[in-house]
Image (spheres, rainbow, N blue to C red):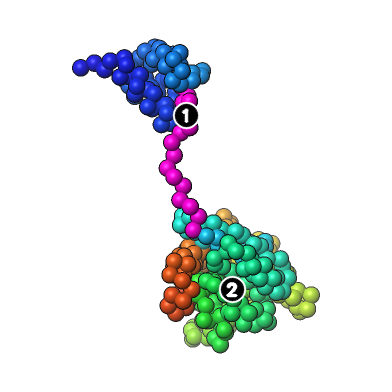
Amino acid sequence: MRESGADRRQRILAMVEARGEVRVTELATELDVSVITARRDVEDLASIGRLRRGHGVARSLVPVRQAPVEPSRGVVALIVPERHAYLNEVVHGARVALEAASVRVVLHPAPQVAGAERPIVQRVLSGEDVSGLLIAPRWRTAADEEADDHWLAETNGPLVLLEREPQTGSALRSRDSVYTDHWYGADLAVEHLASLGHQRLVLAARDDSPTARALRAAFAKACQARPQIQDWAVVLSAPDAAADPANTPHEPPLAHTMRDRGATGVIMHGDIDALILVQQLAEAGLAAPRDYSVVAYDDVVSSLGSPPLTAVAPAKAEVGRLAADLLLERLGRGPAAGPARRVAVLPELKVRASADMNV
């Protein structure tokens, strides 16, 4: 039975009110009528004040009905160092998880000075709205980390450390933390180079963060644990890679260290420094993978190198998500909800063209 004009116009009115605005051509298609018929129906409804007609469209006179917005379940303060690109993906992972739970995120970048986080935490917690903290202190030196240990551990309310592993004996081991297992990542890199036959390795790394210090210590242990590794060395990956560049002794270029020690395997931390070092080595006559194999540590832009760099890839967004989930659990069950947890997330090795067995 053919639909009556009155019924058809009622359907048009319902469609327009539901969507706010509908093109006449779309109405014709969905109603299985000609564009002329749909346009005439729209004109009739507009003439009696049921909708507004525009150029080729029909617009509703009432606001579009929307699903009710779930009220906010509190505010979480996210405190991270300013201009710290490594943590961008961690922050993104945490933000997505918190906003999905209708928790508002307020970002507080900490200036590049020692102890910058403490006044921020005190100011944030003095507000009535903040219900929990996610924090990644900069900790350029081990002394910075030690200075923050007790006051941060004693902070009231739910708190989760982001991408920071509390050290043995630290008071912060009593608080929740989610971090990348950088010892595992360093071991992945050393094992990969050793499996390719490299017996002399160099780590070109930063020395101005907990991640850098963990990589340096883990690299030494991984080399010592493998009898096939005959020699290894650690150098700075960039002029500004030290915690205190002004008081850091000058080092020879990486190419000189590699030639002096006969090194054919290199681990570089982080990505941008790795791409720059590969370019500098090429200018010195050393090409990967012809003369050496390289593994970068970070894997944000390693694949864009020439050649694309094999890399250890921390699951940074997952670290942020897991930290947010842990904090949400604390917020839902209260700050005394069970013992503190330390969650170590394993990185992956992404094998590309910069490593070769021809050594």
Crowding at mark 2 (Cα within 10 Å: few <14, some 14-19, many 20+): many
Q: Amino acid at mark 2?
A: Thr
Q: Name the residue at 48% across, 73% down.
A: 335
x and y percentages locating residue 55 in the rendered image:
51, 18
Quarter placement of the N terminus? top left
Q: Name the residue at 42% across, 26% down.
A: 16
Residue identifier under label 1: 62
343 relative position to 252: left or right = left
Residue 88, visible in the rendered structure: no
Residue nearer the viewer, 271 or 7: 7
Crowding at mark 1 (Cα within 10 Å: few <14, some 14-19, many 20+): few
x and y percentages locating residue 308 in the rendered image:
54, 58
Residue 123's image quarter? bottom right
Q: Name the residue at 50% across, 71% down.
A: 178
Q: Main secondary structure of the magenta part?
A: loop
Residue nearer the viewer, 107 or 53: 53
Q: Most extreme residue toward the right, as rendered?
A: 246
x and y percentages locating residue 149 in the rendered image:
62, 81
Q: Secondary structure at mark 2?
A: helix
Question: The magenta stretch spans which residues?
Answer: 58-73
Query: Is 68 in the magenta?
Result: yes
| Vertical order, 282 against 243 (above or below) | above
Q: Secondary structure at mark 1?
A: loop
Residue nearer the viewer, 343 or 350: 343
Q: CA distance from mark 1 to mark 2?
A: 56 Å
| Vertical order, 88 against 135 (above or below) | above
Mark 1 touches mark 2? (CB < 8 Å)? no
Q: Which one is closest to the eye, mark 1 or mark 2? A: 1
Q: Most extreme residue toward the bottom, as rendered?
A: 169
